[in-house]
Image: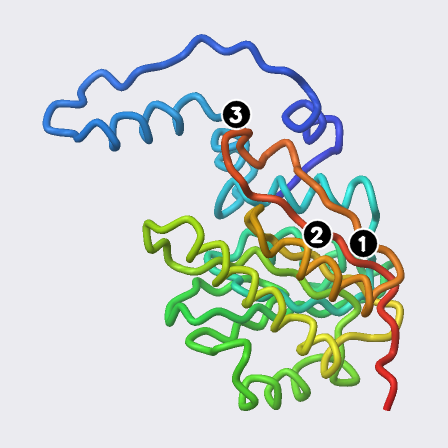
Amino acid sequence: MWRPSSVQRRYLHTTLCLVKKIPNNLKGKSTTDQRWLARQLNDPFVKASHDNNFRCRSAFKLLEIDEQFKILRPGHSVLDCGAAPGAWCQVAAQKVNSAGTNPELPCGAVVGVDINPHIAPLDGVHFLSNHDITDPATHAKLKELLPDGQAHVILSDMCPNASGFKHMDHERLIYMCLSLIDLAEKSLHTGGSLVCKYWDGALAHTLRDKLCRAFSSVRTLKPKASRKESSELYFLARMYKAPIK
């Protein structure tokens, strides 16, 4: 369970000078595997995720965004797209009190959707595993699961399986993000927020332009838990405008 914000800031807002650890036994490992293992051992967010029982380090990206912009509030309904393994749902469930942990606060709701067929259960979260977020059948289930059929916040940390071709992967992720704008028309409260990951590239402006038409405020974010060498960025879109019928 995530604990006091002072611990959070220790990992999110401090330049860490660590003694680099190298695995003692890398015999038989490829060069790529060696680099990955060394990076994991020297990553403070990996350690912090273990210490705080988060399912993966990406939890700290959402924690930092919410710490700054307060998009997740008790009683809110949250839809997490590409939810596996569930770290963002863990953060959302705590923030909106979807498990009813604090009886003095309103109880929210969290629904996580992923094409992955296996996601471990989580208190306060309803997972729709083996579901495509673009499928009308999934939209129908969301109408049933979300209070009033809509969410206050849509989250997306989803991405396509890497093809090895940077431009192709960038394009595929942009189109996945564009589908969230269509989803918002069906499932997001007026005034609601959307957070989506994208990879920087030629089509990023297309996504931003469409978000700007649908939301009153759009920001580009690079959380500290997002590795510097990665082209990964996030759009935070706020104050969703009701579509004109």
Quadrant the N terminus occupies:
top right
Residue assigned mark 1: 218
**Disc assigned to residue 79:** none
104 to the left or right of 151: right
Q: What kind of element bears circle 1?
A: strand
Q: Are marks 2 and 1 in contact (CB under 8 Å)?
A: yes
Q: Quadrant of residue 58?
A: top right
Residue assigned mark 3: 44
Local crowd size for mark 1, using a 10 Å CA cut-off: few (<14), some (14–19), many (≥20): many
Label 2 to label 3, Cα distance in Å?
24 Å
Label 2 to label 1, Cα distance in Å?
7 Å
Q: Percent x, y for residue 139?
A: 61, 85
The residue drawn where x is 49% and y is 48% is: 55
The residue drawn where x is 38% and y is 67% is: 118
Mark 2 or 3, closer to the camera: 2
Q: Depth check: 121 or 191 in front?
A: 191
Residue assigned mark 2: 235
238 to the left or right of 199: right
Q: Percent x, y for residue 198?
A: 58, 52
Mark toward the start of the polypeptide (2 vs 3): 3
Q: Which amino acid, mark 2?
A: Phe
The residue drawn where x is 36% and y is 54% is: 162
Q: Which amino acid, mark 1?
A: Val
Q: What kind of element bears circle 3?
A: helix
Q: Depth check: 87 or 17 in front?
A: 17
